[in-house]
């Protein structure tokens, strides 16, 4: 199996020392990216660690595809213990960081301990440097990247950093790269903040030579020549359809269809798009640089989930208002989904839906933990009772769009996801709208036969996250192509994906997660039976607990390797 190569660099922030070690066995078994991050986190973070404690770790890892020139490969994975869900979480970001990380020569970089002052860490192919940066305290993300350019002569694409939200330990703070790209879900930016780590930069001349099959260039060519709607409107291309089938959460999930959708749909976003945007090596170019000259708003996006969270869910029907919310979150370093949903909960409690000035004020207050923002920075799950609203979260993570009350398989996927209510964990919605060819599609209502498909989809996406391959490659990379790229069989890739999902679940089980956490804030017919079927297919017990016999000994090998 073609996999990531190179040593692990362990960075101890407490003592400001580093250690390099071989993790060849883990790389061979877990591919790269999320798989390697999950294995390292599972084995090295104590099961009783506190998310904001020094024992938590952050693992950055690329994948074998970052050593290629293929489209859909400009991504990097980050893994750690989430302060939002209290379980293991992996998040990945696009942009232009991936090749710079690979250029350092390391396969993965982990950060441990806790600095006694605000630090920047510079990772180079010839070593690691620590620099105190008190002047960056409280500084927004764009100002950090400007500092990197002026003081370190490094581009934004060579930097990851946090904004004020990360420093203030907002539970859904993001780690930002290339200024507007985010390791968004799960609050890993707050973990960086708890470690007093403001920024990490990457530079090096390592250029690994890895042979890839011709199909990689076939994918790249197809991405370049395809006339795909996402090239014009990104993920917002499906907004009108999601609204038409009542899968578009509105007014803090109290409705599923938004009467103001035309003001925030794909056409509205496209009308503000002023150039193409892409990620490293990718010819698909589905990103959305947008601006409004009249109001002086410029950002990248908003993507579909942000249009839902700050648009329909807050009852806002002007795309420029949503653009401004998106820009504020990027500057402060926060996940737009969790932030928008939590604000929507507050708007419901105060009967203030559509109050744009209040929304933007709340974003600022959350990022700085000022006023009511200090409460809302805890996330929906922790504040719902205080606000007197329903708790719309799974495992503490706020919901994206693709409403499971219409897309029943996606609803089941929200429940089983080890990350919480995350649409990208399995991307089951693509089968139910459908966004795939008819032979692969399923009816949106009902759960019959879906647990088996869900297991396959979760495993498949775990492989993509480990590759690391963008999930929007689904129209260009089929099962056979994926197997060819990684020089193995698709059945073996399914085993790798299953191994990753199982390790995540086992870690969470040790922290008390079980069937009670795989719940939804609404009913789906047949849900209990489908959940039990899912557990059986996974080889877990009826309470959703992984048997110890399914977990390896920590050496890199697991029973599935035999």
Image (spheres, rainbow, N blue to C red):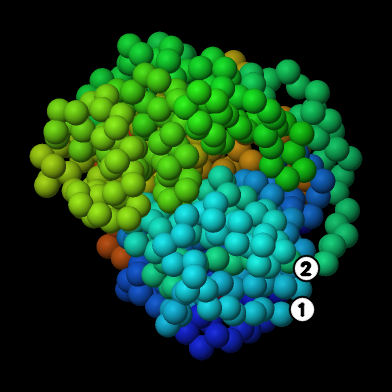
Q: Left or right? Give the position of 114 relative to 5.
A: left
Residue 86 visible (yes or no): yes
Q: Quadrant of residue 480?
A: top right
Q: Is residue 474 above or below residue 256?
A: below
Cα separation between marks 1 and 2: 8 Å
Q: Which of 36 and 74 is in front in this view?
A: 74
Q: For numbered disc 2, what is the local secondary structure? A: loop
Q: Which residue is drawn at 51% across and 54% down?
A: 141
Q: Nearer the viewer, residue 479 or 219?
A: 219
Q: In which quarter of the image is residue 355?
A: top left
Q: Quadrant of the C terminus?
A: bottom right
Label count reads 2
Question: Which circle's residue, 1 or 2, is located before the other in the chain?
Answer: 1
Residue bearing the label numbered 1: 126
Image location of residue 534, percent across then percent down? 40, 42
Circles 1 and 2, Cβ within 8 Å, touching? The answer is yes
Image location of residue 417, percent across then percent down? 41, 45
Image location of residue 471, percent across then percent down? 60, 38
Residue 237 visible (yes or no): no
Residue bearing the label numbered 2: 204
Image location of residue 110, percent across then percent down? 56, 71
Q: Which residue is drawn at 69% across and 30% down?
A: 276
Q: In this view, does 480 lie above or below 469?
A: above
Q: Quadrant of the N terminus?
A: bottom right
Q: Which residue is drawn at 25% across and 45% down?
A: 380
Q: Is residue 92 above or below residue 248?
A: below
Q: Left or right? Give the position of 13 relative to 390.
A: right
Residue 333, which numbered label? none
Q: Residue at x 85, y 49 (%)?
A: 212
Q: For numbered disc 1, what is the local secondary structure? A: loop
């Amino acid at each position: 199996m073609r996999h990531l190569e190179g040593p692990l660099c362990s960075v101890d922030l407490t003592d400001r020392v580093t250690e390099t070690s071989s993790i060849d066995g883990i790389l061979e078994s877990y591919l790269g990216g999320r798989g390697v991050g999950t294995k390292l986190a599972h084995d090295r973070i104590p099961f009783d660690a506190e998310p904001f404690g020094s024992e938590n770790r952050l693992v950055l890892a690329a994948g074998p595809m970052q050593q290629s020139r293929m489209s859909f490969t400009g991504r990097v994975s980050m893994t750690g213990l989430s302060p939002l869900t209290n379980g293991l979480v992996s998040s990945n970001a696009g942009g232009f960081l991936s090749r710079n990380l690979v250029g350092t020569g390391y396969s993965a970089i982990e950060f441990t301990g806790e600095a006694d002052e605000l630090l920047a860490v510079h990772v180079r192919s010839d070593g690691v440097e620590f620099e105190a940066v008190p002047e960056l305290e409280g500084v927004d993300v764009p100002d950090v990247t400007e500092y990197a350019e002026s003081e370190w002569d490094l581009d934004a694409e060579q930097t990851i950093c946090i904004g004020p939200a990360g420093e203030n330990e907002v539970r859904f703070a993001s780690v930002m790269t290339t200024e507007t790209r985010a390791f968004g879900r799960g609050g890993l930016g707050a973990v960086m903040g708890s470690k007093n780590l403001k920024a990490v930069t990457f530079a090096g001349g390592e250029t690994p030579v890895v042979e890839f099959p011709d199909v990689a260039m076939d994918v790249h060519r197809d991405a370049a020549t395809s006339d795909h709607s996402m090239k014009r409107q990104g993920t917002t291309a499906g907004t009108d359809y999601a609204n038409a089938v009542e899968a578009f959460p509105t007014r803090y999930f109290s409705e599923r269809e938004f009467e103001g959708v035309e003001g925030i749909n794909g056409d509205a976003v496209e009308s503000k798009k002023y150039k193409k945007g892409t990620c490293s090596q990718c010819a698909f170019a589905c990103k959305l640089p947008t601006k409004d000259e009249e109001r002086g708003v410029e950002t990248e996006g908003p993507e579909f989930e942000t249009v839902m969270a700050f648009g329909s869910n807050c009852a806002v029907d002007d795309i420029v208002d949503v653009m401004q919310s998106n820009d504020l979150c990027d500057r402060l370093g926060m996940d737009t989904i969790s932030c928008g949903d939590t604000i929507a909960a507050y708007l419901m409690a105060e009967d203030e839906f559509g109050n744009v000035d209040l929304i933007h004020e709340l974003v600022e207050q959350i990022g700085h933990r000022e006023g009511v923002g200090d409460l809302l920075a805890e996330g929906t799950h922790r504040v719902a009772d205080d606000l007197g609203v329903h708790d719309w979260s799974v495992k503490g993570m706020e919901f994206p769009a693709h409403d499971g009350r219409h897309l029943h398989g996606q609803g089941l996927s929200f429940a089983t996801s080890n990350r919480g209510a995350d649409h990208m964990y399995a991307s089951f919605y693509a089968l139910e709208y459908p966004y795939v060819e008819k032979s692969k599609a399923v009816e949106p209502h009902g759960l019959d036969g879906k647990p088996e498909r869900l297991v396959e989809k979760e495993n498949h996406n775990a492989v993509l996250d480990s590759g690391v391959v963008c999930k929007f490659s689904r129209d260009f990379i089929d099962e056979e192509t994926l197997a060819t790229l990684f020089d193995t069989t698709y059945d073996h890739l399914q085993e790798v994906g299953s191994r990753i999902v199982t390790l995540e679940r086992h870690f969470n089980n040790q922290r008390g997660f079980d069937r009670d956490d795989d719940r939804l804030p609404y009913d789906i017919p047949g849900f209990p039976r489908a959940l039990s079927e899912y557990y059986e297919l996974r080889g877990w017990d009826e309470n959703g607990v992984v048997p110890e016999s399914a977990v390896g000994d920590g050496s890199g090998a697991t029973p599935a390797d035999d």
